[in-house]
Amino acid sequence: MVPRFAAEPPHEHLPSGRWALKLQQVFIEACAAIEPDEGEELGQIGEIAWFPDRSWHGRSYIPAVATTSNGLEVFGYIAHIQNADGDEDLTAVADVTSQTADDNPDWTIDLCEEVVGSWRGETDSVAAMTLVWGRPTRSEAKIAVAELADLCVDQCELVDDRFTLLAPDDYRGDTLEIACFDGGGRELARESLYEDDDVDEAPAS
């Protein structure tokens, strides 16, 4: 027993206009707190690519990715709740990686992920509820799917070749795989969240 399709589907278009500028300010402030590895400098943050929103437990998540002038990639998300007055409570999470799709031509999907909560199941086993966003390298992909132990636990359509999933991961020894399909149901790409499918390895981003 494990939660399937726990998150609500996207409710908004990709951020634009004043809303995008507001999100950009919050995300850049979060990036300013990042401490790169020794010897690295973050550099100037380039254009931010926004990803479809997903909502879970009353909070909406809007993922983001941007490259920097030093060849790094910043990634993260903005979580927001709209209160009764219509004001947005915005919080951002950001991190940085030197591993980019340009440097890894063998990647079939460029993935990022962050754990946003947990779900306790049978025998006190706990799943890491994980926000996953990315872009497949083949533009004809139409559907992205999250699978845990060969079970589909989330699915979404791509928007501008981008997708966002929210699904349980690392549950009872099983870990997530992300697959992309074309409009006819043909699998085009598949990636694990973990290097060499080993849960002891650090998650790839």
Image (cartoon, rainbow, N blue to C red):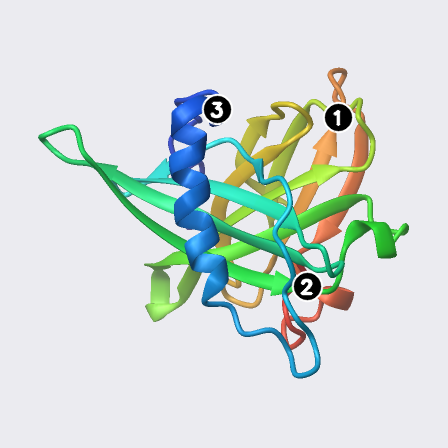
- Give residue 190's position: percent from left, percent from top: 76, 44
At a point 43% along the width and 60% down the height, the residue shown is: 127
Extreme residue toward the top, this view: 184
> Would residue 24 be seen by someone viewing this image from the given angle?
yes
Compared with 111, 88 (above or below) is above
Check residue 141 in the rendering and tell me which mark sits there, or answer none: 1
Q: Identify the element where label 3 is drawn.
A: loop
| Circle 3: residue type | Ser
Instruction: Find the distance from the CA under tag 2 to the CA under tag 3.
Output: 32 Å
Locate the C terminus and report the quarter of the image it occupies: bottom right
Q: CA distance from mark 1 to mark 3?
A: 24 Å
Position of residue 20 in the picture relative to residue 183 (left or right): left
Neighbourhood count class around disc 2 (C-alpha, 10 Å): few under 14, some 14–19, many 20 upward? some
Quadrant hosting residue 87: top left
Position in image of residue 202 (x %, y %): 64, 72
Residue 194, disc: 2
Indicate which disc residue 16 carries.
Answer: 3
Q: Measuring 56% from the left and 28% from the top, which residue is drawn there?
A: 156
| Residue drawn where x is 82% and y is 44% of the image | 108
